[in-house]
Amino acid sequence: MCVSKKKVIAKIIKNEILVDNVYKMVVKSEELIYDFKPGQFVNLYSKDKSMLLPRPISVCEVDEENKEITLVFMVVGKGTKEFSKLRENDDVYLMAFLGNGFDLDCEGENIIVGGGVGTPPLLELAKRLKGNNKIFLGFRKDVYLIDEFKKYGEVYIATEDGEHGEKGNVIDLMNKYVKKADRIYSCGPKGMLKAVKEYASNNNVDAYLSLEERMGCGFGACVGCAVKIKEDTDKGYKNKKVCVDGPVFKACEVMFDE
């Protein structure tokens, strides 16, 4: 195990539904050291004894002054179903902050690309980046956090049916609206991340991807989230753990089904 963090108790400040099956939870903990970097995540622990492993949840926003963390998650199983039922003043155990986040050293033209529940962890990133932000967000149908993102850049939206924004996907939007880019930051489904990597390679743009591999434990013990990352070895790559070595990697180093 590679984590020296400890579990702390957090108080639920707010827990509300954003769209179907997607919840926004705000928690407060005086015990945490708020040394957060956008792209990191927390482990939430169930009170159900049958669920021993925590649920890794990406961090949407961090309010260091008020000691609050905003988490946005989709209900996909028993653990997240339990979390969706928590109410104001309930307690929850969490471990934070885990993983490696995005580098924030680009002060030029930043392109931010999010897909579905890969969108929330990009909000704090957009808030902290210097330079100009163009933000491309893709959803199947229902959209959320749009007004929050608009505070930190020029926002473009794509949905499958075109009910919100333009019909299509975020890669189509990038091709349509991006004339110049110094760096791309992205989080979302694998197919979208592969397309972002290809776009960055074709346009000679530095890019960072936050991978959404399913994590078992969230702190490097189970090796369930291993991915191939290019390195100078006999094989040409090393298997690295998304939860510990990532979730953020350079796009050019990520090997998608290669």
Image (cartoon, rainbow, N blue to C red):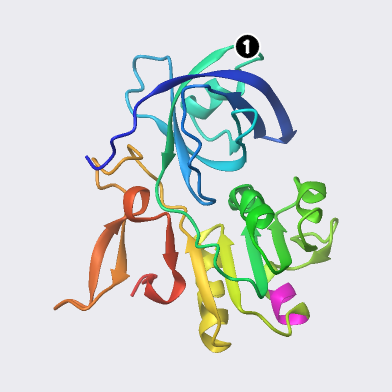
Is residue 82 visible to us here? yes
Q: Quadrant location of residue 113?
A: bottom right
Q: State whether the magenta stretch is mostly helix, strand or loop.
A: helix
- Residue 142 picture location, percent across and down: 76, 47
Q: Is residue 222 above or below residue 159?
A: above
Instruction: Please name the residue shown 21% across and 78% down the image.
Output: 232
Instruction: Please name the residue shown 56% across and 57% down the image.
Output: 188
Q: Quadrant of the C terminus?
A: bottom left
Q: How many marks?
A: 1
- Residue 27 picture location, percent across and down: 59, 25
Is residue 143 visible to us here? no
For this view, does 39 lie left or right of residue 235?
Answer: right
- Residue 50 picture location, percent across and down: 34, 17
Does the magenta-highlighted stretch encompass residue 196?
Answer: no
Residues 57 and 116: in front is 57
Q: Quadrant location of residue 173?
A: bottom right
Residue to which mark 1 is pinned? 89
For this view, does 174 lie left or right of residue 83?
Answer: right
The magenta region covers 172-176
Circle 1 residues within 10 Å: few <14, some 14–19, many ≥20: few
Which residue is situated farthest in the top direction here?
Answer: 89
- Residue 186 picture location, percent across and down: 57, 63
Q: Is residue 135 above or below residue 44?
A: below
Amino acid type at image mark 1: Asn
Residues 148 and 176: in front is 148
For this view, does 206 lie left or right of residue 135?
Answer: left
Instruction: Please name the residue shown 31% across and 68% down the image.
Output: 229
